């Protein structure tokens, strides 16, 4: 029964949630040069957790389901951090972007290991290097 639930979750995730998340990327706001790679990273981590859920052995199913559940709840962490920043009126001009990054920093290491947020930072750096290189090429 647990395996069937995991297969159904992965089917819905890969069929609806991941494509929907990638479509929503076209309307990113906040500090876009941080949000786009962060959003791609979060969506990739979600797809990775779905893949792990599909391929998990019975011995690792509980662990991989917990990882999936934590990645799925990154959004809840984002909302919690945003609510706290709003409640105390902190960092108004960067509140949305910071809440997303702090939510990722809280949830991802618990779900995918301690180095997972470092991967997010690397994704942001690589995206910006590529963005600046493309902007330089377009300008010349």
Image (cartoon, helix red, strand yellow):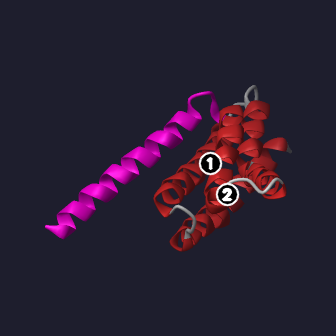
Question: What's the magenta bit mostly, secondary-structure-wise?
Answer: helix
Mark 1 residue crowding within 10 angstroms, few (<14) / some (14–19) / many (20+): many
Region in magenta? 112-140
**Residue drawn where x is 73% and y is 28% of the image:** 60
Residue 122 placement, left or right of 54: left
Mark 2 residue crowding within 10 angstroms, few (<14) / some (14–19) / many (20+): some
Task: Residue 43: give x, y in percent of width and height.
Answer: 59, 54
Residue 89 placement, left or right of 136: right
Q: Distance between the residues labelled 1 and 2?
A: 10 Å
Q: Mark 1 points at which residue?
A: 101
Looking at marks 1 and 2 on the same chain, the residue that comes earlier in the sequence is marked by: 2
Task: Residue 79: give x, y in percent of width and height.
Answer: 78, 56
Residue 75 placement, left or right of 29: right
Task: Residue 99: give x, y in percent of width and height.
Answer: 68, 52
**Residue drawn where x is 56% and y is 29% of the image:** 115
**Residue drawn where x is 25% and y is 56% of the image:** 133
Q: On the image, which quarter does residue 1 sit in?
A: top right
- Which residue is farthest bottom? 27
Which mark, by number, is residue 37? none
Task: Residue 98: give x, y in percent of width and height.
Answer: 64, 51
Q: Nearer the viewer, mark 1 or mark 2?
A: 2
Mark 2: secondary structure: helix
Q: Mark 2 points at which residue?
A: 95
């Amino acid at each position: 029964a647990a395996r069937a639930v995991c297969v159904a979750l992965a089917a819905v995730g890969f069929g609806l949630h991941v494509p929907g998340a990638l479509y929503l990327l076209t309307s990113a706001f906040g500090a876009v040069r941080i949000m786009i790679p962060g959003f791609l990273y979060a969506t990739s981590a979600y797809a990775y957790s779905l893949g792990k859920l599909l391929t998990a052995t019975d011995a690792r199913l509980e662990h991989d389901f917990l990882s999936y559940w934590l990645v799925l709840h990154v959004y809840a962490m984002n909302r919690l951090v945003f609510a706290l920043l709003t409640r105390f009126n902190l960092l108004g001009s960067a509140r949305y972007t910071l809440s997303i990054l702090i939510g990722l920093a809280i949830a991802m290491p618990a779900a995918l290991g301690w180095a997972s947020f470092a991967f997010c930072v690397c994704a942001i750096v690589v995206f910006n290097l590529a963005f600046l290189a493309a902007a330089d090429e377009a300008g010349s």
